[in-house]
Amino acid sequence: MQTALRTALPETELASQANFAPHARVVREERLAQTSGLPLTIRGLRKSFGDNEVLRGIDLHIPAGQFVAIVGKSGCGKSTLLRLIAGLDKIDAGSISFGQDVKPEDIRVMFQEPRLLPWARVLANVEVGLGRDRASQDADARAERALTEVGLADKRHQWPSVLSGGQKQRVALARALVSRPRVLALDEPLGALDALTRISMQRLLERVWRDQGFTAILVTHDVAEAVALADRVLVIEEGRIAHDVVVHAGRPRARGSVELAGLESSILSHLLSADDRT
Amino acid sequence: MSLIDSISRPRAVRLPRIDGLIQWIVPLAIIAIWQLASVTGFVPTRVLPAPSDVVLSGWKLLLSGELVRNIWVSFWRASIGFLIGGSIGFAFGLANGLSQLSAKLTDTTLQMVRNVPHLALIPLVILWFGIDESAKLFLVALGVFFPIYLNTLHGIRTVDPQLIEMGRIYGMTDGELFRRVIFPGALPSIFVGIRFALGIMWLTLIVAETIAASSGLGYMAMQAREFMLIDVVVLSILIYALLGKLADSASRVLERLTLSWHPAFQKR
């Protein structure tokens, strides 16, 4: 794990990683061994929008089944990186590989907005997630199973408009999970939720990730959320990975523990000091 | 329109039995006052006949079969004209909403034609078609075309792009994307177009039948004017009002059935 990181990261990032030495330890290997997730290797990734170079050479290896959080200020390129990983935008230079051929159903995205079809009932919305298997006979059963996983089986015949914000996002999660993806890309999925709903959604996310073992990539502006959920936190500054921090705390995680709080404040101080420099 | 109506209506104070009747209080009151004014001689019957006289002349025309025949002719013209103009407008709305090329090719032309009041074409249409059925159908179709075209186009253009991106991510084909995302998303706007079009449909038909026809409600009214049968004139106007209301109610029912997902249409 550490060696994989070493090869994937340029020297400068390794040096900054040393700042986090007290917290950084090897991610537990036993969980990764039994994962259904796909590993992810990114080399020399660049992306510009017009004259604005958003990503300036990203090199990154994510082992199969790891939960990675990407944090950074707005406009640092974290969402762009996620969209490239999910295949939503075209790459300018570099490569992203999953180590093998992937089907579209293997990679799923969840956005800040639930993006449910208002004119389809909850169950039909989840079935959208089956992709090419939508017409298959067990579509209903699979969608119901996914809804049960997120605790909304009793809402399957409701219209999305009657659901609360948190429930809508859970339906969106069920839709993303119903095809049993091997990589789940999450673009600030909890950003629009209130504090309590957020925490219960974080627990739900952690639980389904542990159950299904996909590789999770979470973009968030909330460092506490990143530290609470991820095995590893990447800090992106000005289109590059500035820090790569491993979170070794056991799961399920105790919120507000001294260890996580310390890690959170040290990542925050990095983000804020970058702010001072500019 | 109907969306706003249903949103602003307070649901808590709804009394189910009275609710359906409330809307008829004002029309009935107007008729009662009208009758009173006629009977007392406050309004001379030469100016406005009493409602009872109007009903009586309606009954006579009904018995002679003239009323039903004329209503049927007008109804037929309205529906066929609406179907022709509506389908062409819908087709252009779809094409220009979905294809940039098609929009570039035809939208400017259509917008220019739209700014010609279609009733101004009546002299030309009479020269082309005479006063037979095709003249009326042409005018109704032309009048109905634009509201349906514009609102279909608007509906498709304003479908949430995030939902379209979602559909693509989840591997929908173009056909599925249209059927499951774009069309349902455009439907509320299409209904606004249909209700506008229904209004224009009656307006066009009345004018066309009044000026150039040998049957239909408008013709019936014009002929009654010739013979100073003012009760028949008033009757024709009232029937137009009734038919207009009927068409509007029909589109509302259709709206309720197809937009049941919309928060404004959900029953408690």
Image: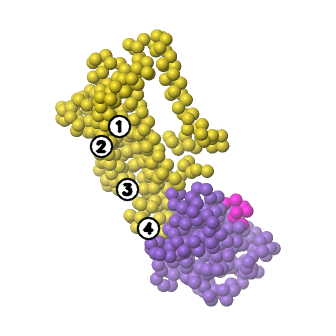
Chain colours: A purple, B yellow
What's the distance in space between the residues labelled 1 and 3, CA to CA?
27 Å
Q: Are marks 1 and 4 on the same chain?
A: yes
Nearer the N terminus, badge 1 or badge 3?
A: 3
Which of discs 4 and 2 lies nearer the camera? The answer is 2
Q: Are marks 1 and 2 on the same chain?
A: yes
Residue shown at 41%/60% (left/top)? B178
**Tag 3: Cα neighbours inside 10 Å, few (<14), some, or many (≥20)?**
some
> Which residue is tagged 3?
B98
Contact? badges 1 and 4 (CB < 8 Å)? no
Residue shown at 40%/49% (left/top)? B152
Residue A169 is marked as none
Nearer the N terminus, badge 4 or badge 2?
A: 2
Q: Name the chain letter of the residue that bears numbered label 2.
A: B
Amino acid of disc 4: Met
Q: In the depicted view, which residue is nearer to us: A216 or A85? A: A216
What's the distance in space between the residues labelled 2 and 3, CA to CA?
27 Å
**Span of residues in magenta:** A192-199
Residue B263, percent across and down? Answer: 57, 51
Amino acid of disc 1: Met
> Which residue is tagged 2?
B80
